[in-house]
Structures are given as structure tokens and as C-alpha cells.
Image: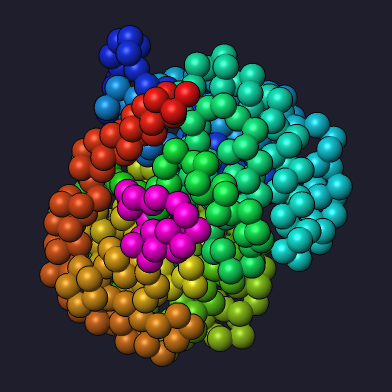
Amino acid sequence: MTDAAGARIYDGPMADRLRVALLLSTSHFEAFYGDGLGLSRRRYLEQYRNDWSWDWCRMLAGENVEATIYVATRTTGELVHTEDGYRVRFLPLSALTEPWVRFPWLERSPVGRYVSQLVNAADMLRTLRRGLLDDRVDVLCVQEYWTARLDLLVRALDTAVVAVDQGLPDRHEIKLIKRGSMRRTAAVVVQTEREAAKVARYGGAAQRIPNAVDGEFFTPDESVSVGSDPVILFVGRLHDAQKRISDVMRALARLPNQWRLEIAGAGPDHAMLERLSTELGVSDRVRYLGFVAESGALRDLYRRATVVALPSAYEGLPMVLLEAMSCATPVVGSDIPAIAEVVHDGRTGLLVPVGDPARLAEALAHAAARREELGRAARASILDDYDQPVVGPRLAQLLRGACSAVSVAA
């Protein structure tokens, strides 16, 4: 059996399978996937396969672990079995969270955000418990552990909880009871060694198990020709405070006129970026592709690009980075832990300081000149350390260990 992207999904017997649920961090589906990415529920279920949760489902299936994606919703709850073999459970919320939906400014302060997260977790608790019971879940994986959601769930549930890092910065999060929350988790999965050290300071036992890419799907294709005019590709949510797309535009303005920028994504800063491109005089060199939900179309963009730029201020371990490198497309990223632990500067890609368009422009030109060399090394590094058949067994072992540890303690 294969999924919508053509990747293999395990379709073996259910006996003795470990069952896990992956609880997404968004307050509700409509906030991130609907308003943020412009996805309807139907399109999300039928086409979208582009984040860590789908990849975890896919690679865990090969290890005889059944994973179900859990996501809160402001509309109806349901368990969906997709045609390509995935399971998604929508957890309906009540009117309890409505004030934070109607008045988002309530979340601007750390205290307001913490209260919002706490109320959101409390609101979904009843339907979450029912889902865990109906799905016979052994382990609940909670995305982003610096939030109040982990603080509540790890105390309110009998199910083993594994905390999962996907890049949420902790600087402005309230951590008064985080030490107790970390001690109650069965395991903590992090993306970087720096994050593991931070978790250890709060009493958590973290293991670095990075996001992984399907190296059999995201491959180079020698039949795809790269155009004579260099193309910079950016893929991600148009949230400039994190992704620093404005730095890519300012770098583009420093490069010769034949250089182009393609932006694949949607988000709140689209209009701002359009204004900036006009101010910089590069609007005719920028192409907005919108959000690309289909994995095959995204793979084609990587293959045709001269270089992929990801100058983010912070990240977990971005799938864009892994996918581009797996396609043997060189990457230029910011010198932050989540990227620097994957990209070996000068060998498998190039790193630049955050917020330095001049250095970014130089690195983009350098990467274009070394495209074949950098791309070949990048592809090899992905297959060695970040391919799903490499990462999947490690992740499955951790989850089985978390389940066993809780069973013994009980």
C-alpha cells in the first residue's frame, strides 16, 4: 500500500501492534491549517502530507506501530481513515475557548498565552480521553512541551505521555511547573543536542531523534533541467518573524537581475512581503506560488530550484531542509542549532548569520556556483542520518520503551 505521495505504508496484521496518538500543537485545526494554510478539512485529509506527523505515521507503520494524528477542532469530531492508509481523529472543542478565538490579543502576554493553552487543553480533555480509549492508545505524543498543554495533560491522563519538540522557542513561555511536568513524561524527543541539554536542566531525559525524510520519494532527477536563470526557492509559512523571508528578498535585490525568487507558502505576512518587494524594486523577480499541498509538486519545485533558502530565526528541524537536501538541491540556512546540526557549512550546504541579507546574498551565489557538489554531499548525508528507514526504528524503540516503563511503574 502507498500513500498520496507514493511512499510505502505498512499494511500488515494488527496483532501486537503498539498504538500511539500524535497530538498536534495548534489550538484548533481551523487556526493553523484553515486560516494559516488555507486548507479545508477535506483537502487536508486527501492531499496534505507535508509535516512531521504524517512522516511519523509512515515510518512507524513500517515498525508495526499504528499512529493516529489527533487535532482539536471548532467543528465536528470524527475519526477518519484516509484512502492512503492514515488515521486522523478530530477532537471537538466547546465554547470554552471562544474568547481566545474571538480576541487573539489575549495571547500576546506570556500569562495570557499560558492561560489560553491551559483552557484549550482542559476543553479537549473529555474528547481526548474518549479518543485514547476508543483507539486503544498506548502512548500519547504531545507536540511542543514548553506549553501549558503538557503541564495539564501529563497530570490528568493515565496514558504514557511522550513530549515532542518541533521548534517552539521557550524564551517567553511560563515554566514554573515545567520541572514536574518533565519528570512525569515517559520520554522527551528533541531535534537538537542543545535542546536536549535545556530539557535536562528541567529534569527531563531527552533523546535526539530528528525528523526524517522519505529518501525514496524525495530524490534527484537528472531529467529535470535547472534553468539558466538562477532560482531561489523558499518553502514555508509566510511568517516573517520566524522565517525571515524579507531577508531573502533583500538578498535578491543584491544579486544580478537574472536571479528569481519563488515563494511556496501562505501566511499572515503575504501583503507585507508584496509591499517590500515593490519597495526593493524586485517585484517582477518574485513569484508567489501559494501553499503547495501535494508532495509531488513540492518535489518538482526542489528539483528545479538552483538553491533553497531557509534563513529562519528559529526552527525545530524543518522538513523543507531535509526534503531539499534529499533531492540534492543545495541549501543556504541560518546558523541556528536546528539547522547547523544538519547542514555542515561548506560541505553539505552553507550557513549565514540570522538577519544578514548581505551574507545571505553571497552564500546564495556561492551555493549556485557549487550546486552539483553541495547537492551530492547533501543527499548522501540525508541517506546516512535522516532517511526514514534509519530514523524509524529508533523512534519505535523509544515509544515501546516509554510504554513499557509506564506499564512497569503501574
Q: In this view, does 376 lie to the left or right of 324?
A: left
Quadrant where the N terminus is found in the figure:
top left
Q: Is residue 379 left or right of residue 103?
A: left
Decide if residue 409 is in sight here: yes
- Percent across and percent down for residue 402 are 39, 34
Q: In which quarter of the image is residue 290?
A: bottom right
Q: In this view, does 368 lie above or below 34?
A: below
Q: Quadrant of residue 111?
A: bottom right
- Percent across and percent down for residue 319 are 38, 53
* Residue occupying the point 66% across, 41% down: 152
Residue 247, magenta (yes or no): no
Q: In this view, does 32 lie to the left or right of 345?
A: right
- Percent across and percent down for residue 53 are 45, 39
* Residue occupying the point 51% across, 49% down: 182
Q: Which of 315 and 209 is in front in this view?
A: 209
**Number of residue marks:** 0
For the record, the magenta segment spans 191-209
* Residue occupying the point 81% across, 50% down: 100
Q: Is residue 347 left or right of residue 121?
A: left
